[in-house]
Structure formats: C-alpha cells, structure tokens
Image (cartoon, rainbow, N blue to C red):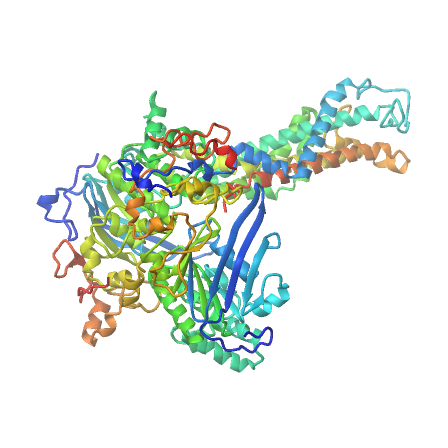
Amino acid sequence: MSTPTDIPSIPGAGGPAAERGEPILAVRHLVKEFPIRSRGLIPRTVGAVHAVSDVSFDLYQGETLGLVGESGCGKSTTARAVLHLQKATSGQVLFEGTDLTTLAKEKMRLLRRDLQLVFQDPYASLNPRITVNEIIAEPLKIHGLYGKNGQQTVNDLMQRVGLNPEHGNRFPHEFSGGQRQRIGIARALALRPKVLVLDEPVSALDVSIQAGVINLLEDLQEELGLSYLFVAHDLSVVRHIADRVAVMYLGKIVEVGPADELFERPLHPYTQVLISAIPIPDPRRERERERILVQGDVPSPANPPSGCRFRTRCPKFLTLDEGQKQRCVNEEPPLIGRGLGDAHPAACHYAEIQQVL
Amino acid sequence: MSTIDSGESATLTATDTVLSVENLAVDFPSGDGVVHAVRGVSYELRPGEVLGIVGESGSGKSVTSMAVMGLLPKTAGISGSVKFRGRELLGLTDKEMTRVRGKKIAMIFQDPMTSLNPVYKIGYQLAEAVLAHHDISKEQARKRAVELLEMVNIPQPDKRVDQFPHEFSGGMRQRVVIAIAMANDPDVIIADEPTTALDVTVQAQVLESLRAAQRETGAAMVLITHDLGVVAGQADRVLVMYAGKPVEIGSVEDIYYNPRMPYTLGLLGSLPRLDKRDQSRLTPIQGSPPSLVNLPPGCPFTPRCPLAQEVCQTTEPELEQVAAGGFGLRGHMSACHFKELVAQRDPADLFAATAQDADLPDVFGKNDRVLERDQEPTGRQVAEDDFGSDEEDR
Amino acid sequence: MHDLPGENAQTTGNLTPSAGSVEREFTVQARTQFQLILRRFLQHKLAVISVFVLLAVILLAFVGGPLWHYSYTDITPDNSVSPSGTHPFGTDNLGYDEFARVLRGTQRSLEIAFTVAILATVIGTIWGAVAGFYRGFADSLMMRFVDLVLTIPILAAGALLSHHFQSAGWWALALVIAGLSWPAVSRIVRGQTLSLREKEYVEAARAMGAKDGRIIFRHILPNIMGQVIVVVTILVALAILTESSLSYLGFGVQAPDTSLGALISQAQTALQGGQWWLFYFPGIFIILICLSVNFIGDGLRDAFDPSQQRVRA
C-alpha cells in the first residue's frame, strides 16, 4: 500500500484548506496522450493527440464538481483517466491520499468499489443479454458481496433509484431510456462507492425525463454523502446540479470556480463565449442577449496552438495590441487567481469579467 | 392568388399562406401492428415566418416534415393535405416533387457529415444545386456558389469553394448545407434538428447563418427541434407535438409565458435554467410517451397528466382556441379539456418535484405499467366507481 | 363542471388525477429475448421449411436406416436393378441396396459434419476471442498462425492426412477437416470481439473490477453467439462438401462403410452405364442438407439481429 502523499494545494480549490479539509479526490498534472502511429510494416510514432494536458483539480467530499467543455476538450478522457480505465501518460490521481496511477492491479480492483462510473448511453451501457437483476448484482458478485441477502440488496437498490423491483427479471430492452439510466445508477451504487464519476449521464434522455434523473442524483448525493465528478456539455444542467465548475478547452482547464459565480462573472474569454452561446428557453431574454461569436474551428488536439490554446479563436485576442498578442502566442497563461480570488482562477493573461447572461 | 407550375414566383403578401398543412396523418406498418406516427397535424406558414415544431422522441415531428417533402418510404400511408402556395403536394409523382424540392421547398437535415457527397468539391455541389433549377452558365453558377458561401459567413469563400467536404468542420459543413438550401431562393426551408449534432458554440454560428439566410431570401422556415432554448430564440410561432399530434400552438411568447396544456407546462418546468441562481427542484413529467401502436382512445398524455379526469380517457381533445389574453396574432390553441386550469400556473403547482420513475409501487397500489397486461389492472387510489375496468376502454 | 383536482392533493403536492392508469402507456406485448429471436426466425419462411426438411433427413438417416429391412452391408441377389418396390433407390452392381446405402451415407456425412462444426466452433471461438480481447502482440501472433493455417489447401492437406490415417475411422477425417476450418471461425469471432470490447457495458464491467475471463465469457461471447451460430451452419455445409470431395478423391470413408461423397464417387461411371439412380439419389441428399443448413443459417442470422428493439415510434 503506497503511503499517502502530501497533496500540494492548487488554486481552484473551494476555499482555504483549513476549512475544506483534504479533498477526497485530487488530480495533479494529469496528462494523457494518444500516440499517432504511421502505417507500414514497422509502425513508428509520428505524433500524439494531446487529449489531456496537465490537468489538476480537487473534488471534496459531498460536493459536485462539474467538468464542462465541448467535444474534443478532453473531459471524457479525464474522467476515464481518473478512474484508471485509461492509463494516464503521467500525473497523479490521489484518492483519499493513495495514488491510483501507481497502484498494483489487485489493489486497484479493490479500490474500484469506491469509485464508480455512470455512463452516457443508456442503450449501450447495459449488456442486452442479461436481466436487470443480474446487471445490478454483478458488481456484488465480482467482489464476493452477494451472499444470502444479495437479491434483497438488489431490490433495495432498484427501489432507491425509483424502479419497481418486480421488474428485475426483465431485460434492458424492455425499459425506456430513463429507466435504463436508473438501472445504470443502481449498478454504480451497488458497491457503496464514495465517488461517482458521471459521464454525460442525462444527455441522451428527453428533457422531461432528464429532470427526474437529475432529481434522483441530487437526492442520492444527499442521502449517501456521495461526491460527484459530473462531466457534461450541457451547461444548464451543470449550473443546476454542480457546486463548482471547471471549464476545459483542448485538454486544459481554463477556468474553475463556484457555479453561480462562474456563470455570472466569467473571467476567461472561452467561458464567456460558451455561456453566451447557450440558448435560454425564455424568448424575451434570448432575443435581448448579445452573443459573442467565436470564429474558426477548434484546432486539432494533435497540433495545439503554442502559448494560449484558445488564442486562434479568442475574441479578446483580436482587441489586443501587438505586444499583448505576442504574450498570448509565446506564454501559456497559468491557471491562477485573476481578481476574484484563488477560488476562481482563470488561465488568461487578460482575463476580465464580462456578464453574458 | 398563387401560380401553379410556372417557375415564376408570384409575390406574396403578408397574409398569404405559403405552406398549408391540414390533417396530415402518417401510418407505418410494423411487426406489431400499424404505427400511427402522425395523427392529424395542421398548421399554416406565412412568408418570412419561422414556425418551431418541438417535441420529444416519438412525437412525430420529423415524420411530419418528411411527409411534406415526400421523403417517406413507399410503405408509409399518408393522408391529409399539404398545399404549397395552393398546390397540393401529396400524391404528386416523384418527378413532380423533384421540381418542387430544392427549388421551392428546401430541407436541411441533422447530420452534416452525411448530407454532403464526400467525393465532390463544395463548389461543385453548390453549383449543382443551382444548375438543377436554373439555366445559367457554369461560371455564373460558380459565382453564385461563392456568394452563397459568403452569405453563410464562411471565411475565404473563394478558396473554400474548391475544397472537399472533409476539409470542413461539422459546423461549416452544416453551413454549406444551408447555403445549398438557399441556392435557389426557396420559399420554405424545413430544418430538421439542424444543430443537434453540433457543439454549442458551433450551434450558435450555424443558427446565426440560418437566420441570415432566411432573412436574405425572405423564406419561411419550419424549425424542428427538441431544444426549447433554440426555439425560444429563433421561432415566431411554436407548435408542440406529443404522440403524433399537436397539443398546443401559439406565438412563442404565448407558449413560453402562458402555456395552456399540461404537457407544455411540464416541459418548461423540467428545464434547468442557465440564467437563474438558487434553483428550486425540477419538476419532471413521470412516465414515458406512449407507444404509437394500439393507442388507447382519449388523450395520449392522460397517464402522465396531473389534471387527468375521466373525460380525458374517453375523448381525445381537439385543438381549440384558448381564452383571450394571448400575445399572438393568430390565436393560441390548445388540445386539453382543462386548458383554462393551466393558465398562470407554475409547473411546480401541478407536477411533483419527484425523483421517482412512475414505476415505483407507491400509495396508489400496484402500478404494473409496462408489461403485465395479462394481470389484473389495478386502479390508482381513486373513487371506486370511476372508470370500471381498464380493458373496456381499449 | 369538474372539481378542481387540487382538492385531493397529496402531501407531496402532487395532484391526484382521477383517471389514467399508467398501464395505458404501454400497449405493446412484452417479450423475452428468446421469444423475440424465435419470432423473428419464424418470419423466415424458407428457414422454417428448412428446419423441417433437415429434421426429416436426420430422422430418416438415424432412425430409418436401422429400421429398414436391408442393411447397408447386405448383398442382395439383385444386381443393378433400377428403383422398384423392393428397392426404392435401386441397387448397385454388387447388389447393395441403394436406399440403405444412401441412408447410411447420410448418417455418416451428418456425423462428420456436425463434429467438424462443433470442434471448429469451440476452438475458433476461444482463439478468436482471446486474440481480439487482448490485442497487441498476442493478437498478432495468434492471427498470423491463423493466416498460416488458412493458406493450407484443405483438399490437398485433407487428402494427405487421411491417406495416412486411413484405418483410423471417420472421426479422424472429421478432426482433419475441423483442424483446417477453425481459423475461419476465429477470424469472425476476433472481429466481433474487437468491436464489442469497446462497448460501454464492457467498460462498465471493467469499472466494476471484473476480471478478463468474466468479461469475455459473460459479456462478449453471449453477444456474439448470433454470428457464431451462423458460422456453424455454414461450416456444416462446408464440411459435408469437403468430406464429399475427399471421398470422391478416394480418401474419405472406407468400404464397407459409406458416405454420401463416397457414393457419388463410386457412381461416376454408373451414369454412363445408365444407372442414374446410383448418382442422383445421393446427390439430392447432399443438396438437401446443404441448402437447408444454409437457409437455417440465414434465418438465424436475421433472428439474432439485435437492432430490432421494442416497437416504439
């Protein structure tokens, strides 16, 4: 068992360390690169896709940290690297002080009980050939926890997520999308985890069904004292459920902060663009809003821009003078406090609050 | 009023109807019986107007527009009437439809990756769209192609026009698709979930281009989506669909600020808000949309409706004008026996902020929803004499 | 005028609707996985007919054979008699009753074919699943071996091996054919495994801490079974044809035992001599078996197609 390491603190944590205590999950300088190999008889590595580049964040007990960004930003890869479903290229993932990246395979298997994952696709995340009872029972059986009361445990779990235990003998295809997602949640809860990583858990559901699952997740968090790492691209959902939010762009975290503050006083131009782009279901407000439009395409993660990765599309960049622009090109802006304190850092040399709601 | 086939476009006044759909119904045969995907959709579209059709999965919104464009498979049974400028479109041969499609009515699909042919240059595909309906030279067509790219804000259009689709990103491809749709100055654009597959910042760009294109050509637009935010920003009028039928129609302000159908109210209540802090709990709509095979009589929303009464089980409500006080010109209609009860209510008044799925056996007794049809139907906790056996109603 | 439902509000704040049970939502009959598969299979008319045909052939061969009053070793005094009452399929020039011979031959051919199918499937499935699951170096090695075996021409190798093991019996022949056809199965299984291992439910199993074996046998293989069964049916047909070819070349089943292929082989000259019954009857049986197995394979493939879910608009 590796000895608990001292966790260096980073900006973006939810408050003075003395108040918050140690985070239950601490990610430090996580890097994940996918090599690009040339084809041919002897494949050589000719480049890499920098999916996650030096990401650090804390997750505290009982809180929900939202990890948001658009496609290609690396949030899903981060989630999987945190759970060690993808081997990180470098960096540390400290769960209750233990570094998961250096853990032996057997020990990791045991720790998996504390860290579970809820998937996005309710149709693909359940084995279509086994019954719901078996799906939920599987984690228990794998870890030898099924025993005599196994079926009762499964029934309890089904009830807890709002499903009828009498339907346990059915197959997944007989349930609706929302119900399948609940089955997935029940499965994730079977081992009484401490941390749940949720990868777009409601994106595939209809809006009226989403709400029920969101309520369920909130209830469960309160009841069971869970900590959530909530990965999503839907900012409305994230604002509703998250305590703190981290925004990712092209493999890096560009801003972190308490949810309400981040949405009302965003610092980083990308955050501002993102929030501005989201349509609000309120016709008058929606038509009165000013949109910040971003130009161009997302650069390829195999070849990210130098310095600040957002500079090729940044609306603020266009307003800077030559000297300032040079700084953006040459110097990668660190994620530090920019006027709103250490609890709300941003990675931009010229960060400025701009309200976009 | 309207010319029929002459290829000249008569000028339309603001009160003319450019597209009129009446009682459109579509049936599909399937292994389990006939699927009534669309069960009587009617709406009118004026020039320059944007009609948003919203609904969740299974509501039939996409099938409706496919029927209008004549893109459904031969096995589909279509009835009703679709009139473009007074001319009936249903029942036209494929050849005749081809003349209408693209020129008068253009369609934009969801997936930008497959809407374009990967082996032809963008300029070629744009020019092809133009040349299909106009007799002009290749140079003129190319010039028009560059103009179109400019209209949708594609940077460096003169260079881009010679590139292939794979050199464009998803959002740009969708904008090219919009440009192609605009190529022939259509009178109606039907956009079916045009931005669903795109990232949100790209979505904003594409919607902006769509708006620009629509304004420039003066076309009317039917925007089909499940995203209530998009509709709020783009539509003038909104039609809400549920289980193959429209359940509410009105101006966008009517629908969002004064909904008169419990489903619409429920939908609005289940949306988390980006612009509000300290949000109260969401109010989901429990249960799921019904299967469109063997639909029981009465209102299809009954099992999920907090206002349901006996009449809802027996009679399906018609779309009727709502009491005065709306924001819209052409009236606000709702298909609900109790539409007046919904007025000025908060979703939380009617819908519980629950986390449960409707499956849970609760105080109402055994609610064996899904699958045990062979079992005794057990009623909810209601008056005993209420509706007798469920079986009779089927 | 209806009372405001608000009167009956429960403490949760939910207004009690007085009508509309949740059952109304679901008006499609429930079906288990197996019933769905069966139903889809039954929609394939040709496949269903083929099942009956094949069953009839099997019964005829295994039950009818021993029951027939002539055994395949009996030498009757009637030589080269064309089909008649006593000899429905006629006799050959040695006096064997052709009906008995054909039934026996069918029996043999079926035994060989099914043995081959089962052996090749088991070996091929495990090989392909392991290769596809672990990928990397192990996969490359295993599949190169598969490629190697596939280059061996089955008839030449089969002929050579069965020549050496002539006295070993029909099961040796089956082994040889199985040994050369399992690679085809492994290729398909590997392909399916490669795609399924990326599925989210496999990832979920990993996230739970499931061991590799469990993932392969519990999550991947059951979902491939559909494809594998189809391959099995194809192998059956292939095995019969291969055995027939080998027997035709003189290397299969030896006298006095017979197989359909051997019968055809012996009947080569018979056609020219006008004894058509010695050639066509065995031929028809081969065709019947291969065709019906093929159609059953088609039916199974469609029946196992998981893309047909519950009927919902």
Residue drawn where x is 45% and y is 56% of the image? A39
Q: Nearer the viewer, residue B78 or A102?
A: B78
Query: Is residue A320 at least partly visible in the picture?
Result: yes
**Numbered label tally:** 0
Rendering quarter of residue C242:
top right
Q: Nearer the viewer, residue B144 or B327?
A: B327
Q: Is residue A17 left or right of residue B232?
A: left
Rendering quarter of residue C173:
top right
Q: Quadrant of the N terminus of chain C?
A: top left
Image: A333 above or below C309:
below
Image: A66 above or below C210:
below
Q: Residue A85's x, y, as percent?
A: 33, 43
Q: Residue B384's x, y, as percent?
A: 40, 29
Query: Is residue A125 at least partly visible in the picture?
Result: no
Q: Is residue C275 left or right of residue B253?
A: right
Q: Nearer the viewer, residue C207 or C258?
A: C207
Q: Residue furthest front?
A: C1
Q: Residue B119's x, y, as percent?
A: 53, 66
Q: Nearer the viewer, residue B274 or B295?
A: B295
Q: Residue A31's x, y, as percent?
A: 27, 52
Residue drawn where x is 47% and y is 38% of the image? C26
Image: B53 above or below B146:
above
